[in-house]
Every structure is written in structure tokens, then in C-alpha cells.
Image (cartoon, helix red, strand yellow):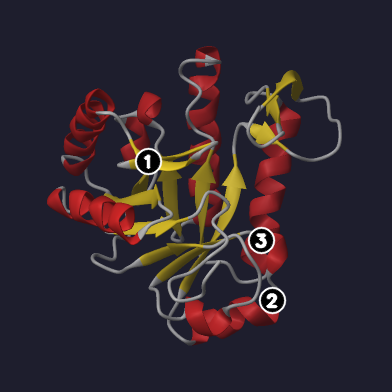
Amino acid sequence: MNHQRGGPIAFYYGMNQIDRLVAFDRVVLQGDAYSEQDIASLVVRGVRPLCYLSLTEDVGPPAEWQREDRNPDWGGKFVHVGHPGWSEHVLNRARDMRRIGFRGFFLDTLNIELTYSEDLPHLLTLIAAIRELSYPDYLLANRGFGLLPQLADLVDGVLFESFTSRWLESGYAPWPPDVLDVHARYAEMLLGLDVEVFALDYADTPRLAEYARERAARFGMPCFVSTRDLGTLPGQGS
């Protein structure tokens, strides 16, 4: 894999803010929010833009690969990952995003081991196809613990989303101690693999944000802190 060690990362699902995004080595963006000119502006200034890709949920119009069930938090339909039409849909999206200048992908919605475990082999096959299509671009997986250790051979980095904190209907809070212990064990496992590891946490107070950063640092993980909708950047305000 093509590792670039040590650079900061941002996750931003809003629009514009090009001048703030250049403060980061890598930025994860929604592909439809930026023009080819925007992406070129980031690349020429030394930023590696990564495009968001959902691999097990579909927010688009009804399609034959969709299951009946929806994600209760975001509304997307779960999919039959092994459906040829879904694979073609995802790979066509990846081709389009590479064409406008994205230099890699953020692979999301990988945690299906407790819901559709029969789709895990299909998910690895899809990630391998994205790897082949996009090489040598950077691939960052979101969690995907049910795919380890094979996943580590297909991606350059793994994001530990919600490592220390989480969002609740009443706001944001740290995970309880037993969950933090489980997350620590996963982090130690990830750090033993040949991938970069990052943390993403959610916070609405400076104290919680600092706690998340400090805890991630103890595991050697750069940590980006934002809000649930990933709609703010440091210094931007809400």
C-alpha cells in the first residue's frame, strides 16, 4: 500500500470552505458538493481529497439491489451487497469521482457483521474491486472490524469513528467505561496492522473535544472532532 505517514485529516460534509480545507493533508468530502475546479484547487495546494462512498446503504431512488429495511438514523436503504447491479453502481460512482479529480475514497457503512453477516464476503469482494479500480489512490475504511484482518490488505488506512465520544438525542457524551475498554482493544489490534489509523469523535464542548483528542493520542491516532452532521471545521463555527 502507498502509506503517507503522519498527516492530519478532516471530515467535512458541507460545501465550500476550500481555504480552510487546505490546512489538512487529506479531506473526506461528499462528491456532489464540489466541482472539478474545486477538487483541482485542493490538489494543486497539496491536499488529497477523498470521496465518500457508502458500500452497504443506498440513499438513491428505488433499485433492485435494495432491501426493505432502512437505516433508522440516516434513512438510506440497506442493500444486497453481492447484487451485480449494486457493485456496478458503486464502481461507476468511483470512476466518476476519479474523473473529476478525487485522489481516493472513504469507504463507509462497513459494519454489517451483526445485521447481514452473510454479505461480508461480498463486501470484501467489492472493496477489492474498488482497490483495483483506484490503485494507487488512497483507501480509508470506516471501522469494518468484521472484515479484519483481510481488510488491512486492501486499504491504506482505517478510521475509528466514535472512538471516545458519541452523539445522543440529548447531546454528546463519552462512551461508558465498558465500551471504552472494548474500543481500546480494537485500537490495539488495528495498530498491529500495516495501516494508518485515525479517530473521529463528536463533541459539543471544548472539554469533551480535548478528552477525545487526548485519549486518541494515547493510542497514536490523530483525532478529528466535529458534530454529528460533519458540517463544521475548526474555527468555522456552527
Q: Earlier in the sequence, mark 2 or mark 1?
A: 2
Q: The N terminus lies in which quarter of the figure?
A: bottom left
Query: Is any atom of residue 232 visible in this view?
Result: yes
Q: Earlier in the sequence, mark 3 or mark 2?
A: 3
* Residue receiving disc 1: 173
Q: Is residue 221 above or below residue 113?
A: below
- Which residue lies at the image location 39% right of the left edge and 27% below the top edge? 147
| Between 133 and 44, the one nearer to me in the picture | 44
Label 1 residue SS? strand
Give neighbour class at mark 3: few <14, some 14-19, many 20+ (Cα, 10 Å).
many
Label at residue 150: none
Which callout, 3 or 2, points to the residue nearer the camera? 3
Residue 6 pos. (x, y %): 24, 66
- Which residue lies at the image location 57% right of the left edge and 61% below the top edge? 231
- Which residue lies at the image location 29% right of the left edge and 30% below the top edge? 149
Give neighbour class at mark 1: few <14, some 14-19, many 20+ (Cα, 10 Å).
some
Label at residue 31: 3
Residue 10 pos. (x, y %): 43, 64
Q: Residue furthest front?
A: 170
Gap between marks 2 and 1, in whole Å? Answer: 38 Å
| Between 123 and 22, the one nearer to me in the picture | 22
Query: Is any atom of residue 162 visible in this view?
Result: no
Check disc 2 and give the amino acid type. Glu
Using residue 140 as the reference point, say whether residue 40 is left or right of it: right
Gap between marks 1 and 3, in whole Å? Answer: 30 Å
Q: Residue furthest right?
A: 62
* Residue receiving disc 2: 36
